[in-house]
Image (tube, helix red, strand yellow):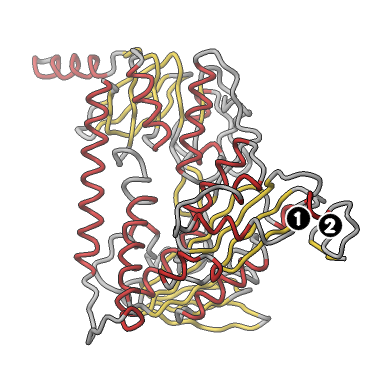
Amino acid sequence: MNRSETLSSTHANQARALEEYDLVILGGGTGSTIAAWTFASQGQRVAVIERKYIGGSCPNIACLPSKNILHGARVASYFRRGKEFGLAADGFRVDMPAVRARKRAMVSGLNDMYLDNFKQTRAEFILGSGRFVSPKTLEVSLVDGTTRLLRGANVIVSTGTRAALESTPGLAEAQPLTHIEALELDQIPTHLIVIGGGYVGLELSQAMRRFGSKVTIIDRNDHLLHKEDDDVTEAIANLFRDEGTDTVLNARVKRISGKSGDSVSVVVEQDGGEKTLAGTHLLVAGGRQPNTENIGLELAGIEVTDRGYIKVNERLETTAPGVWAIGEVAGSPQFTHVSVDDFRVVHDNLIGGNRVTTGRLIPYTLFTDPELARIGLSEKQAKAGGITYRLFKIPMERVLRALTLSETRGFLKALVEVNGDRILGFTAFAVDGGEIMASVQTAMMAGLPYTSLREAIWAHPTLVEGLIPLFSSAPSLSASVGTGSQEAIAIQGAGVVQH
């Protein structure tokens, strides 16, 4: 062996020397990033292995950049509505490279902030691809071609999910957009065809329509957001129809030809027949699949479900001792705020507590305009569970702040228990609905009666002030139950019947 070979061999052995950590995290999502900063700031030696994105998908290719783009589309909609606000304009042009540049600038700033937090907390950020080679031990392939071997006293897996691409004939060859590529567009699609009417599909569909695209949404169900209450699905359908977006429902994609970005044809089966949709761009937003392949889970004793997600118990422990999983890869609801709470569960358990994921009150927000925000039970869920309730509901026209904004589309509604004043659920299809929901969520977490929201002194005029007319829209128990009056309310399983 010559000198150069000896040096090379020595370097390889040094590169693969086993490095011991208190905590090794595979995947740099939001929950795991906060875990790294927290444990490191408490004096532990922590390493985060991330394949590509500083901070994971949320600040780079998902939540935050998408909301950045959506806000740009909202501004475009205000330009189109200019006359309504007394603003005369001869026209305007959407500059998509500038839209993208604004988004990129935000992402760059977030990356800098994240790296600074790693530096301040002394958590180690390792850019590379990691895989288990034995229990609690991971090999990391670095971008410079070298490898490292890390072992953690505890390991957290947070590798997330990715857009699912079905094996539809011609789909892969069409090179469709996912949300990642859609957020990087530097041109307005002439005609965007969207496969999937869920959160991602609807948000991006509305944005592109408002930027000026013709948009067609294909969904296999009979309604967009088919799991939501009927009044919600009707409101969403009306919104997209009024904005000029076409929807093709009860449709299954049979085959695709062409290439996204140029010309693409999608053949769907609907009502027993076939129809062909032609567009310039194709966006796939038909679900997610977990990133659990080729990371050596089987070598670490980590089992997965039949859908490929990591098996965890209510404490987020995997089937391997000392290994935990958080976020979407663990089958948690696919929201960043849930990933953060998953971190809290693992953190408390690692320091000797017994925190579980069961019984969590999880908020949902679809960032269309208006937003759809929901917490607790929906009416469909209450009916399915045989849970009786009192229904409170008002149109947004009754919220004075909405009148000042000319944003009166939508409604607020709440479900309250029959024999008490506890709030069971709340839904807002309203301008800034997520912000309104937060106040109701706080009350639900604190166990406050709905009357506390009705009788609060809210600042006037604000959107949250709409909770006063909302929770005044049905008689209270003290005023009705047992009185025998015409206002008494009888609850029959899933609705309100007045006697």
Q: Quadrant of residue 125?
A: top left
Residue 304 in picture, x, y percent from top left: 58, 35
**Residue 469: mark:** none
Q: Quadrant of residue 352?
A: top right
The total number of labels drawn is 2
Position of the N terminus by quadrant: top left
Q: Position of residue 338 (x, y in %)?
A: 51, 39
- Residue 335, position as x, y percentages in the image: 49, 45
**Dividing the image into 4 quarters, which one contains the C terminus?**
bottom right
In-front residue for pair 347/47: 347
The residue under label 2 is which amino acid type? Ile
Q: Is residue 242 left or right of residue 105?
A: right
Q: Label 1 vs label 2: CA separation?
A: 7 Å
Query: SS for tag 2?
Result: strand
Between 270 and 60, which is closer to the camera in this rendering? 60
Depth check: 475 or 269 in front? 475
The amino acid at mark 1 is: Arg
Q: What secondary structure is marked by label 1?
A: strand
Residue located at (32% from left, 53% from top):
65
Mark with earlier residue (1, 2)? 1
Q: Which residue is mark 1?
A: 390
Q: Position of residue 474 (x, y in %)?
A: 72, 60
Q: Is residue 472 left or right of residue 6?
A: right
Mark 1: few, some, or many residues within 10 Å (few <14, many ≥20)? many
Near mark 2 (Cα within 10 A), the count class, few <14, some 14-19 or many ≥20, is some
Are circles 1 and 2 on residues that touch, CB within 8 Å? yes
> Label 2 belongs to which residue?
491
Q: Is residue 26 left or right of residue 374?
A: left
